[in-house]
Image (cartoon, rainbow, N blue to C red):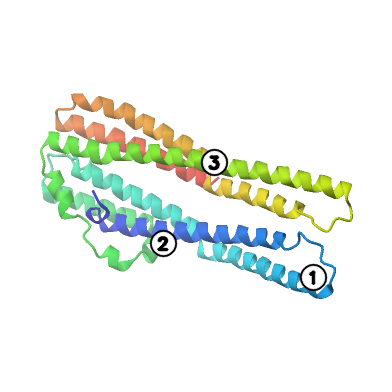
Amino acid sequence: MIEIEFPSYYQAADRSSVKAQSYYVNIIRINLLSMIFASALSIYNYQLTNSKLIIYMISGLLLLLSLILTIVLKIKKYEDIWYQGRALAESCKTLTWRFISCSEYFEVNLSLLEAKERFVNRIKELSKEFSELSKIMDSRTLSLPIITHKMIELRCQNTIQRKKYYIINRIENQKKWYSNKAEYNVGKYNIWFLVIIFSQIISFISIVLLIKYPDYNWNFVGLFTTISTSSISWLQIKQHQELKQAYTTAAQELNHIVTLSESIKTDDELSKFVLDSENAISKEHTLWSAQKRK
C-alpha cells in the first residue's frame, strides 16, 4: 500500500512527524556546527587588536545563534511532535492492517458497515489520545477519507488472497526496511566513531606540541575537542548502535513469524498471525520510543 491508500490520520500524523524530525535534527546540526566554527576561529593567536575584535564578534554571533536555536527547540517542542506523530502514525497503520486482514476486533464475521464503524471509532479514540498533536496536523490531509477504497477492496478478498497480500506488503516489506536500516545505522555508527577517535588523537597531538612549543601561535586543541564532543552528542541523538540492534531484532522476529504462515488456512488462523506480527512490529516501535527518550 502506498501512503494515499492509508487513512487520513496516518498520513497527517506521518507528515507531522517527518516535518518535526527534520526541523529538530537540522536545528541540532546547525547548533553543533555553530559551536565548531566558533572554536575554529580561535585556533590562531592573532596579535593585532582589530583582528582579535573581528574574531571575537564573529564568535559571539555564532554562540548567540546557538543559544537562539536551543531556545527555539525548547519552545517549539519538535522532539515531542516527532515522537507523538510517529506513535499515532504507527497505531493507525497497525489498525489499517488489522482491518484489511480481518484480524482481531475487525473479524471477517462482521459486516462491512460494522467493521467500518469500529475502525472509525478507534480512530476517534486515537485522535483524543493525541489531541495536542491533532491541533497542529494539516487540516487538508485530515479531510481525506478515513477508510479508503483500497482498504475496502483488500478486506473483501478471500483468506488466501489477504494472507498473501499481508505477507508480501507488510511482513516482507517491513523486514526489508528493518534490515536496510540496521545496515545503514552500522555504517553511520562506524563513521562517527572514527571521527571521534581521529579528533581526540589530533587534540592530544596538539597539546603535546603546545607543551613542547609554548609560544606557538596555532592551537587546535579547542577545535578538535569541540568536534569530538559534538560528534559524541550527535551519536547520542541519532543512537545508531541502539537502533541497529532494535531493527535487527525486529527483522529476526518477523522472519521467525513468517515461517509459520504456510500452515494458515482459515480466517481465525490468519487473524492470530496478523495480531502476532503487528505486536512484534509494535514492540520495535516501543523500544525505539524508549531509546529516544533516554
Is residue 125 visible to the viewer in this orientation of the structure? yes
Frontmost of labels 1 and 3 is 1
Residue in the foreground of this view, choosing between 252 and 194? 194
Identify the amino acid type marked 1. Answer: Lys
Is residue 104 visible to the viewer in this orientation of the structure? no
Identify the amino acid type marked 2. Answer: Glu
On the image, the x and y values in percent for residue 30 come to 57, 61
Residue with the mark numbered 2: 132
Residue with the mark numbered 1: 52
Q: Is mark 2 on a helix, strand or loop?
A: helix
Frontmost of labels 2 and 3 is 3
Q: Quadrant of residue 61?
A: bottom right
Whichever of callouts 1 and 2 sits on the residue coming sooner in the sequence is 1
Whichever of callouts 1 and 3 sits on the residue coming sooner in the sequence is 1
Q: How many labels does the image show?
A: 3
Residue with the mark numbered 3: 189
Q: What residue appears at the point 41 percent right and 39 percent down from the top-left corner?
A: 284
Q: Is residue 101 above or below residue 120?
A: above
Q: What element carries label 3?
A: helix
Q: Report the disc number at residue 263.
A: none
Whichever of callouts 2 and 3 sits on the residue coming sooner in the sequence is 2
On the image, the x and y values in percent for residue 268 come to 18, 31
Q: Is mark 1 on a helix, strand or loop?
A: helix
